[in-house]
């Protein structure tokens, strides 16, 4: 299997499944693996393509089952902001927050970490004064779908169903004790309410610029703009 990992798109849950099917975790139930161990222990043990010689890279690209999981870009950006800046998990994101405040804050009396609007200003800035980060970098830049020609593209909204399919088609389903329940409904009302509570504070022109930045992801991966964002863009 070849997998392009995208931060904020079920990367921890997929990491659990990989730990099982590669034999790194002695068990079949992904829920028994503590989430912190995925990033601190198991992810570092997987083979990355860029660590291999070119002939081995090309061989794997040609012969392996290649897949990627994606989610709505506006949802992913909000998830990244809430997870990394509302309560920064480590000093690197605290540093990024201070940098964004220094570059994009116009209200000198405002205190505290980077606001969501300042974060959006950073995302749409063509000058890229502050380098991008995989947690919000567009899918098409991270995973090169036009070059890689994936065998399967899964979506976060149908994660359980899509993961079962990947395991079954690769004859791996017996290795993983997967939940028998269907995907939890990705409640439209709940999602729209959360999106609206943040994106409604963003000026319309800035929101349009943000959509343009992630437009290729919407087209390439066949996403519909969330209803809450559609209303704000009108």
Image (cartoon, helix red, strand yellow):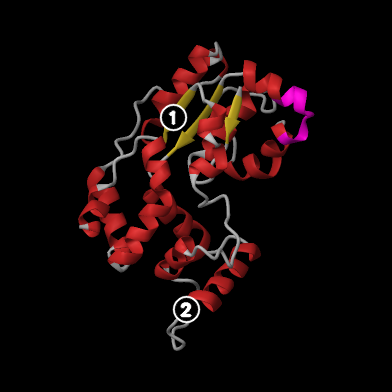
- Classify mark 1: helix, strand or loop: strand
CA gap, disc 2 to disc 1?
37 Å
Instruction: Residue at 47%, 78% (x, y): give it.
Output: 105
Q: Can you tell which of label 2 and label 1 is closer to the viewer?
A: 2
| Region rendered in magenta | 50-57
For the N terminus, the quadrant is: top right
Instruction: Residue at 49%, 75% (x, y): give it.
Output: 104
For the C terminus, the quadrant is: bottom left
Report the magenta stretch's main SS: helix
- Classify mark 2: helix, strand or loop: loop
**Does residue 60 sit above or below 10 in this rendering?**
above
Decide: few, some or many residues near mark 2? Use Cα within 10 Å; few <14, some 14-19, many ≥20.
Answer: some
Can residue 32 be seen here? The reply is: no
Q: Is residue 147 magenta?
A: no
Decide: few, some or many residues near mark 1? Use Cα within 10 Å; few <14, some 14-19, many ≥20.
Answer: some
Closest to the observer, 95 or 127: 127
- The quadrant where residue 34 appears: top right
Q: Mark on residue 196?
A: none
Describe residue 213's horizontal placement relative to residue 204 as left or right: right
**Does residue 50 sit above or below 115 in this rendering?**
above
> Where is residue 83 drawn, in percent x and y?
49, 57
What residue occupies the far bottom of the structure in this picture?
A: 109
Q: Mark on residue 154?
A: 1
- The quadrant where residue 26 appears: top right
Q: Mark on residue 105?
A: 2
> Where is residue 82 drawn, in percent x and y?
45, 59
Closest to the observer, 213 or 31: 213
What residue occupies the far right of the structure in this picture?
A: 53
Instruction: Residue at 53%, 76% (x, y): give it.
Output: 103
Q: Is residue 52 magenta?
A: yes
């Amino acid at each position: 299997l070849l997998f392009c990992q995208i931060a904020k798109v079920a990367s921890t849950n997929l990491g659990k499944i990989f730990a099982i099917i590669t034999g790194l975790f002695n068990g079949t139930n992904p829920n028994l693996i503590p989430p912190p161990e995925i990033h601190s222990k198991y992810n570092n043990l997987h083979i990355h393509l860029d660590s291999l010689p070119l002939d081995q890279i090309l061989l794997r690209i040609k012969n392996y089952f290649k897949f990627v999981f994606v989610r709505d870009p506006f949802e992913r950006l909000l998830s990244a902001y809430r997870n990394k800046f509302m309560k920064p998990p480590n000093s690197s994101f605290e540093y990024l927050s201070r940098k964004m405040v220094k570059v994009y804050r116009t209200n000198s009396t405002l205190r505290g970490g980077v606001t969501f609007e300042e974060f959006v200003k950073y995302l749409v800035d063509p000058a890229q004064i502050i380098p991008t980060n995989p947690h919000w970098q567009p899918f098409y830049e991270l995973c090169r779908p036009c070059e890689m020609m994936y065998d399967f593209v899964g979506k976060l909204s149908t994660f359980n169903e899509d993961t079962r399919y990947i395991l079954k088609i690769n004859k791996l389903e017996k290795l993983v004790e997967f939940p028998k329940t269907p995907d939890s409904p990705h409640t439209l009302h709940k999602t729209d309410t959360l999106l609206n509570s943040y994106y409604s504070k963003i000026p319309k022109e800035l929101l349009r610029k943000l959509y343009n930045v992630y437009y290729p992801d919407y087209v390439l991966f066949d996403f519909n703009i969330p209803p809450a964002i559609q209303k704000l863009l009108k």
